Amino acid sequence: MSQSQLLFAEAQKHLVGGVNSPVRAFKSVGGQPLFISRAEGAYIYDADGKKYIDYVGSYGPMILGHVHPKVLKDIETALVNGFCFGASTEGEIILAKLVKEAFPSISMLRFVNSGTEAVMSAIRLARAYTKREKIVKFSGCYHGHSDFLLAEAGSGLMTYGLPASAGVPEKTVKDTLIAPYNNIAALKEIFEAFPEEIAGVIIEPVVGNMGVVLPEGDYLKELRALTHTYGTLLIFDEVMTGFRIGFGGVQNHYGILPDITCLGKVIGGGMPVGAYGAKKEIMELVAPLGPVYQAGTLSGNPIAMAAGIATLELLKNPELYVQLNTRTQTLATGIRTIATKYNIPMHVAVHGSMITPFFTGNKVFDYTTAKTADTERYAKFFNGILAQGIFPPPSQFEAWFVSAAHTDQDIYQTLEVFDEVCKNL
Ligand code: KE4
């Protein structure tokens, strides 16, 4: 047995499913989950010392690559000054200013410890600000595991949410309405049905959690106009997309400003950080200024702030994004070429340094089309490339992440393995 297998066997005795987050269990691709011993740059090493080119990147945070020397140094410097105080530190101000510099729609923000916390707080804030209770989310979008967002579309036209998880009471999601992504007509119907009841519309403006799915045409512009018309707050969940295409988010790239932005992943540089922010008029409702309660023992943790500051300061280099996004496009072009060469139906979607190869001949523009992907074929592909030292997400419906540490040689080597595996897929 490999070390990963031995560790997984032991882990299953103590940790649910042997993991601390379900996707890591490799359930949808089969086989044994990897246990990682260390990582550096674009590479991770499993418990048996096997090296992989990493396209999981901790599901987004590791945009600079693992153990970036500057980030490491700044974390070490912070560590000797104390781990956490339950009191404010200058680092929280510095990181907040960097986030505001990147996101002009944010004039005030609050740090939390995860994307889930950021989104949960943003929804509470939207409900308090509008004095309304209904929220709209989109099929296939994931916003963390707070109860009222673990909702999926019911059958038929009515779009009331049904619990997407055991333990979520029906009444908890009765105010969660579900619309298809990239379908403005469906959203208009919801607004016409509940013209004065919707507190917020929350969306992954570019979706990462179906795999990468891009907004079509003027979808985001129409979404913004519709929410303005009905006095509903537009919440961009940029936990994954934040800093993924440039020093900012989808909102900068498409020029559509939301009312509230949720962030996570990259802003912590690998340490646990989430954030939500908006213009002052909205954020001033949050305690201690206003009646919206939200708190957190480790929020603004000085070590996490140091990691986030070092990361964002390094990301203020436009050349880094030109190189990173170009390499991602090279990977995408290479995958498409290989798929065509072997007549494998494939839709490859790219947003900055996020990429997903969907094993389907359909164009993927929403959850229904995403689900036409051949997950068995993806599983075979995944296990084939994993065996040859390439580590992508163990699910067809995730984004792959390229980092600034990936070299042209890494991309070339990845495509060589793809060709080898796709030959017999
Ligand atoms: P966390 O609570 O996991 O920090 O963030 C939740 C979240 C919120 N919003 C978006 C757009 C997200 O992508 C996420 C978390 N993303 C998943 C990847 N599909 C994290 C991986 C995992 O759950 O282990």
Image: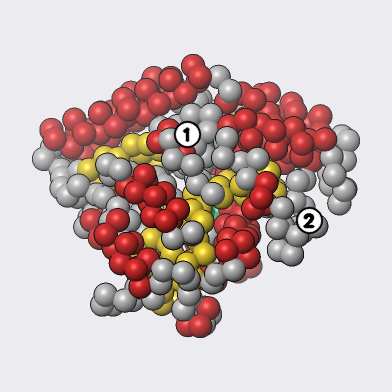
Q: Quadrant of residue 64?
A: top right
Q: Position of residue 69 (x, y in %)?
A: 66, 24
Q: Kindly tell me whether residue 292 is visible in this rendering.
A: yes
Q: Local crowd at mark 2 within 10 Å, few (<14), some, or many (≥20)?
A: few
SS of the residue at dot 2? loop
Q: Kindly tell me whether residue 120 is visible in this rendering.
A: no
First-in-chain label (2 vs 1): 1
User: What residue do we see at 38% from left, 60% from top?
Assistant: 138
Q: Position of residue 65 (x, y in %)?
A: 55, 30
Q: Nearer the viewer, residue 107 or 269?
A: 107
User: Is 91 placed left or right of 9 in the picture?
Assistant: right
Return the residue at label 1.
252
Amino acid residing under circle 1 = Asn
Amino acid residing under circle 2 = Leu
Return the residue at label 2.
289
Q: Position of residue 225 (x, y in %)?
A: 39, 50
Q: Position of residue 253 (x, y in %)?
A: 43, 33
59 lies above or below 306: below
User: What residue do we see at 77% from left, 52% from top?
Assistant: 298
Q: Is mark 1 within 8 Å of ligand 1?
A: no
